[in-house]
Image: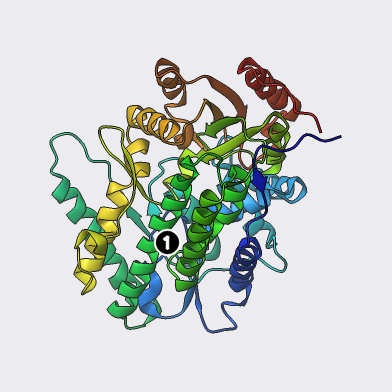
Amino acid sequence: MGIQSKYKSKPLDCWQKGKELRLNYYKSLITAREEGRLLVSGSGASCLALPAGLGDFVYFSGEPYGASIGYDPAFSLEAMEAAEARGYARDMCGYMRNYWGSMFLDRYYFGGPFPKPDFFLTRHLCDAGHGKWYQVCKEYYDVPLFVYEQPVTPPGVRFEDVIEYLASQLYDSIEWMEKITGRKYDDEKLIEASRNFFKSEALWGEICLLNQAIPAPLDLKSELALMPIAIGIRHQPEAVAFYEALRDEVKDRIANQIAAVGDERCRLMTDLTPPWNFLKMFRYFEKYGVVFVGIWVYCINSGQIEIREDGVVLPAKTPEERNMPLNNRADALRAIALWHLESPLSQAFSSPKRKAFDIIALAKYWRCEGVVMHYNRGCPLCTLGSPEAKLELQKAGFPVAIYEGNFADFRELDESQVLDRLETFIQSLGLSKLED
C-alpha cells in the first residue's frame, strides 16, 4: 500500500497554453517570410524590442534553438559533426555548434529547411561566443550583421559613461536597420515592445522567486520548459499575459499549499543549465523527496531580479515602476541600456566573486539545503569562476555537489556517473528513497 504524500500536487493549469506558445513561436520562424514579417536572429540575451520599430518581425533566438537540438541526441550529433567538419572545435559553445550545424545541413529541427534570417542583430555579452557566433552566420548567408557590445565597468569609470556608451550603440543599430531594410523606424512601436520586454523579464524573475515558498509550487524541470517563452517572445503582449497568468496561478498554489513535488523533503538549487538530453535526472531524485527549486543562470538571464549588496533578493521593478518615463526613443534606449547593465547576469559574468555572492544569496532566499553545480563544458563563460563559487558556498555552510557535462552535447556526459555522484551526495544529506 502506498504512503500518503505530504502535500497536494497537480499539474499547472496553464501548462498547455505554455506549450502552445512555445510551439507557435518555432512555427512562426518558418512562416515569417510568407507572412511578410522580417526574420531577425541573434542571442536570446539581446533586447528583442529593438527591431520592433521596423514593423512585424520574428526574433530567432539562438540559445533556445540550440537547446532544443541538444534535447535530441540523434539530430544533435549530425549538427555537431557538420560544424566540426568545418573545423570548429568541441570546446566551443554547445548551443552555437548545434545552431551552426543545423544551418550547414539546411535542416530546421522543427521541419523543413533552416530559416534564413533577413539580418542578424545581437548583444555581445559572452566573449566565448555571441559576436563570433553570428559573424559565421553572416559570412555563410552573406546577410547584414550588427553587434552591440555590452561593456564591463572597469574601476575608475563613471557608470553614467558606460550607460551612454551602450545607449549610443543602440542608436547606431536603429540607423543601421533603417539603412539595410529601407524602412522608416517607428519609435512608438519600440516603446510598446520595450514595455513588454521589461514586464516579461520582471514577471519571470518574480515567478522564479516565488519558489521560496514551502512546499515549492514549481520544480526546475517545469521552469526550464516555460522559460523559452521569455527567451523568444518576451517583447510581445502574449508573453506578458502568459507570465501574469502563471504568476497568479503560482501564488494560488502557494496559498493552497499545492506542491510541485508532493513528497518534498529536501530543497536544492543548481547554478547552470543542465544537459538538455538528461532532464530526467530531476524526476529521478524526486524519489528521494528532492525538489530542485531554482537555477541561478535563467533566473537572471530570461528574467530580471535585484540582488542588493547586502544579499537581499527582491523582484525587479520595470523602468516605469521606478518613475523612468518611456516617452521617446532616447528614454527607451537609455532604459534598455540601464536594464542590461544592472542585470545580475552582467555583473556576475564580469566578476567570479559576484557570481558566488549571487548564488549564495539565492540559495538562502530559496531556503536550499544544498547546491548542485554543473561544470558545463559547453559554456566556457558560465563555468568561469565555478570552482571559486563552490568554495564560497561551502564557507557559507551549503553542501555542494559537482558534476561535469555539457548542456548541448550529449557526448560530454556520462549519465551513470552523474547519477551515482548525485545519489551519493543526496544520501550524504541523510535522505533515502521513498517507498512507491
The structure residue drawn at horizontal position 56% and vertical position 51%, both measured from the top left corner, is 256
Quadrant for the C terminus in the image? top right
Is disc 1 placed on a helix, strand or loop?
A: helix
Picture coordinates of residue 384, whole percent (x, y): 44, 30
* Viewer-nearest residue: 316 or 302: 316
Residue 376 shows in the view: no
| Residue 312 horizontal side relative to residue 217, left or right | left
Quadrant for the N terminus in the image? top right
Residue 9 shows in the view: yes
Picture coordinates of residue 285, whole percent (x, y): 69, 32
| Residue 153 horizontal side relative to residue 236, left or right | left
* Viewer-nearest residue: 397 or 195: 397
The colour scheme of the drawn protein is: rainbow
The structure residue drawn at horizontal position 37% and vertical position 82%, both measured from the top left corner, is 182
The structure residue drawn at horizontal position 46% and vertical position 79%, both measured from the top left corner, is 56
According to the picture, the residue beneath numbered tag 1 turns out to be: 200
| Residue 10 horizontal side relative to residue 194, left or right | right
Q: What's under tag 1, amino acid-wise?
A: Ser
* Viewer-nearest residue: 132 or 218: 218
Label 1 Cα neighbours within 10 Å, binned few <14 / some 14-19 / many ≥20: many
Above or below 433: residue 130: below
Picture coordinates of residue 196, whole percent (x, y): 39, 68
Q: Quadrant of residue 335?
A: bottom left
Q: Quadrant of residue 77?
A: top right
Looking at the rendered structure, the number of numbered marks drawn on it comes to 1
